[in-house]
Amino acid sequence: MTVFASGFSWYQLLPGVGDGSLGHTLGLATPHEAWVIPAAWAGAFVILGVAVLARMGLESALKKDGPERFIPDSGFTPRNLLEIFVEGFYNLVEGILGHKEAPRFFPLTGSIFLYIVVSNLMGLIPGLLPATENFSNNLAMALVVFVVFNYAGLSRNGMAYIRHLAGPMLAVAPLLFPLEVLGLLIRPASLTIRLTANMFADHTVSMVMRQVSGDLLGWLGAAVIPVPFYALGLFVCVIQGFVFSLLSTAYVGLSTADMSHGHDDHHH
């Protein structure tokens, strides 16, 4: 059985993943990275499971009579957690996009945030690799964002979205237009590289500290010494999801801004 570069993973036990046969069948350039497929689905199933439980809790509350239907559950139930997230994150998206555009793009950016955070947190469990450590997985999300914010810009502003790339004057268009287009292309690349590098580094540090402390102090050291690094990793997991989704929202906001008043007003 092939040992993964990032260490042992339970995904190796799945048929076709450990020996790379699934990757060969799918035509992957690196067949032994086929683990990202079950890893991505695992994160998606966790989110769907929590969503189903939250929906069941909400429907149970709506069946009650009077004001009791509006009283939150006691404790950290799936319903409470998702209500807190939806309200807080929606207000953040609305502050960037406005009340008109927020309902249209919140499902995308909110889903991206949840997927990244859940995948990152799964990587803190020994034997699990986060899908967000994989470059292709993160590039796929970044390309979706790239298509969405460009489509949003074209659908909201039409040709004004293209004209603003040329700058305020025709004389500088040959210089500014390639630079502006390059800037658009750099956005998905920066989203991908930032998330991949941070999660790979975070997972590698946690794995190394667990192995070193285990070799020096036994199972007790492996369980206790890495705790501060796991606390830092927990912070990184949330922050990286926040940064990716917040930048995605900002890109949509820049594309949907009113460009009818000219390039200068848009940048202002």
Image (cartoon, helix red, strand yellow):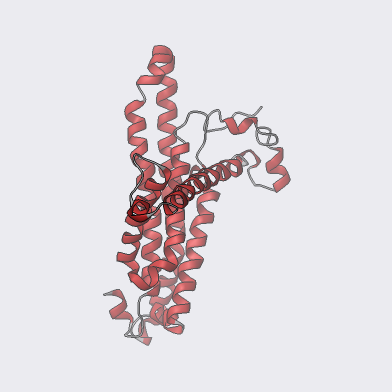
Question: In this image, 126 relative to 73: left or right?
Answer: right
Residue 50 sits above or below residue 112 on the image: above
Res. 216 in view: no
Residue 64 rendering spot, x and y as whole percentages: 41, 51
Foreground: 118 or 177?
Answer: 118
**Quarter-of-image position of residue 107:** bottom left
- Residue 218: name its quadrant: top left
Q: Depth check: 34 or 49 in front?
A: 49
Residue at screen point 40% across, 43% down: 198
> Front-most of 25 and 67?
67
In the picture, the quarter occupied by the C terminus is bottom left
Q: Which image quarter: residue 249?
A: bottom left
Q: In which quadrant is the N terminus drawn?
A: top right
Up the image or down, 142 lies above or below 214; here it is below
Image label count: 0
- 213 versus 264 height, above or below: above
Where is residue 88 shown, x and y percent of the image? 32, 55
Q: Residue furthest front?
A: 65
Q: Position of residue 45 (x, y in %)?
A: 55, 44
At horizontal 40% and vertical 71% (from top left) the residue drawn is 179
Instruction: Work out which residue is located at the far left of the displayed protein and give it.
Output: 268
Residue 193 visible in the picture: yes
